[in-house]
Amino acid sequence: MAVTEYFVRYLQRRDQLSEADIACLRAIPTSHACFRPGEVIVPRGRQATRSCMMLRGLSARQHELAGRAGERVITALHVPGDFVDLHGFVLAGLEHDVVSVGESEVEFVDHADLREITRNFPHLTRLLWMSTAIDAAIHRQWLVAAASLRSAAHLAHLLCELYTRLAGVGAAQDHRFILPLLQRELADILGYTPIHVNRAVRDLRAEGLIRWIGSEVQIIDWHWLARLARFDPEYLELGRAPR
């Protein structure tokens, strides 16, 4: 298979790609795999020879807490078009697992092909670097949200971010998207108990801001949801930088 068009769109939203750049991306050979809910996609602590890109569904960066069996913290969510472990290209291994959230499909890219890009395509190399920088910016924003927002606003921020990221690559539209997260998984992301998460969801529904049935989320009032969350998408670097 060839690299997903989601990643091409991800890059095109942020910078210009030449015909040679696009041809290079579309020529990258990939291997395809499907994963069940909770299945490990990329294990921690292993010398990596390839990197993983989301094709369908979601994945999470999951950390097990030392000395507290069964307890975990989720520090990132990945959407279609994301390289979930591109930092593993330059590191000896990962200190966390990447696990499937719901059913998911991924593409694996060999590091040999990434090294070829870094040797021959400096602009694409810079954009790969940019994607890891955006990943870090998202992580920092999660820390800010956790420190400054109450439960309903914190959840609202997560929903605004996920919809913006999904819509940016064409994987969501009309303020609707699929979020196959269980309440305990939301609790692991937001740092609350499942009871607090349930109350946050109930509060957003009661305010008429969202409709959430099963795994489908509809944002009914984007303006007020974003205002509640103090959501500013600037950290997602959706616009092209001026030259």
Image: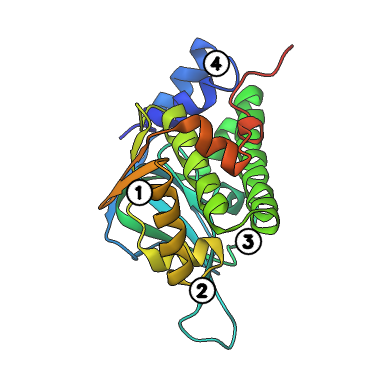
Q: Position of residue 73 (x, y in %)?
A: 54, 69
Residue type at mark 3?
Answer: Ala
What residue lies at 44% left-to-right and 37% top-to-bottom?
163
Marks 2 and 4, the one that precedes in the sequence:
4
Contact between labelled residues 4 and 2, with CB atoms less than 8 Å apart: no
Q: Which residue is mark 2?
A: 72
Inter-mark Cα distance, 1 to 2: 20 Å
Q: Which residue is mark 4?
A: 17
Marks 4 and 1, the one that precedes in the sequence:
4
Q: How is the image coloured?
A: rainbow
**Nearest-to-viewer mark from 1 and 2:** 1
Asked which secondary structure carries label 4, the reply is loop
Q: Along the horizontal axis of the image, is 6 left or right of 161? A: left
Residue type at mark 4?
Answer: Leu
Contact between labelled residues 2 and 3, with CB atoms less than 8 Å apart: no
The one nearer the camera, 1 or 239, is 239
Contact between labelled residues 1 and 3, with CB atoms less than 8 Å apart: no
Residue type at mark 1?
Answer: Leu
Inter-mark Cα distance, 2 to 4: 39 Å
The one nearer the camera, 38 or 110, is 38
**Residue 119 visible in the shown view:** no
Q: Which residue is mark 1?
A: 179
Q: Which mark is residue 92?
A: 3
**Nearest-to-viewer mark from 3 and 1:** 1
